[in-house]
Amino acid sequence: MNLIPWRQKRRREQSGLRPASPLARLHDEMQALFDRFAELTAGWPTDFPLAGAPLLPMNVAETSSHVTVTLELPGVDPADVDISVTGDLLTVRGEKKLDREEKKQDYHLVERRFGSFERTVRLPSTVNPDRIDATFKNGVLTISIEKRSDVAARKIKVRNA
């Protein structure tokens, strides 16, 4: 990250002069701080947010008779998952609890996430909210929602006027 326009920085580097004013020294120290932070965070994963609820990978698939929503919830107890439908919104929320082991360990890297989560997806208007089935197997939650039979697609013939 570079806070100094490249022309000014190049001129200062070529001249070999150190900045004289306290403000210029503060600017250089801030630049060094940002550079160190960028080096430190270079290997951090970028596929999930650093703060807040973890991202829940989700697939939504549709067939002629069902809409299937699949979520990965590794390490989550199925009893800690709540599924609700309000209008055309399907919401999955729950909590991944921290397993406490009282061993004296020095962690060098912690990537496992704990805490509450929530994910909402809009459902097609053709689904029947009264016909929902949810199963949980091997850390994968599968929600199958049956489509209404009265909303089947039909062909409409075009007439000449």
Image (cartoon, helix red, strand yellow):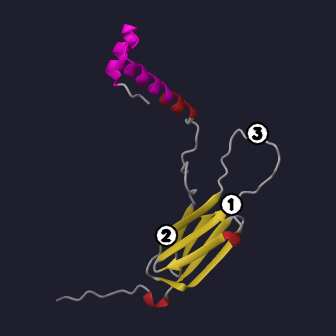
Q: Is residue 53 above or below residue 5?
A: below
Residue occupying image coordinates x 49% and y 87%: 148
Q: Is residue 63 left or right of residue 72?
A: left
The mark closer to the camera, 3 or 1, is: 3
Main SS of the magenta segment? helix
Q: Position of residue 43 (x, y in %)?
A: 58, 37
For residue 6: magenta?
A: yes
Front one among 36 and 61: 36
Describe the element under mark 2 as helix, strand or loop. strand
Mark 3 or 1, nearer chain start: 1
Residue carrying label 2: 121
State which quadrant residue 106 falls in: top right
Q: Quadrant of the N terminus?
A: top left
Within-10-Å neighbours for mark 3: few <14, some 14–19, many 20+:
few
Q: Is residue 156 left or right of residue 146?
A: left
Mark 2 or 1, nearer chain start: 1
Amino acid on which disc 1 is placed: Pro
Q: Which residues are magenta?
A: 5-33
Residue carrying label 1: 74
Find the distance from the CA under tag 2 to the CA under tag 3.
40 Å
The mark closer to the camera, 2 or 3, is: 3
Residue carrying label 3: 106
Amino acid on which disc 2 is placed: Val
Q: Position of residue 29 (x, y in %)?
A: 46, 23
Q: Position of residue 21 (x, y in %)?
A: 37, 16
For residue 15: magenta?
A: yes
Q: Position of residue 42 (x, y in %)?
A: 55, 35
**Numbered circle sitting on residue 132:** none
Residue that sits furthest to the bottom in the current view: 150
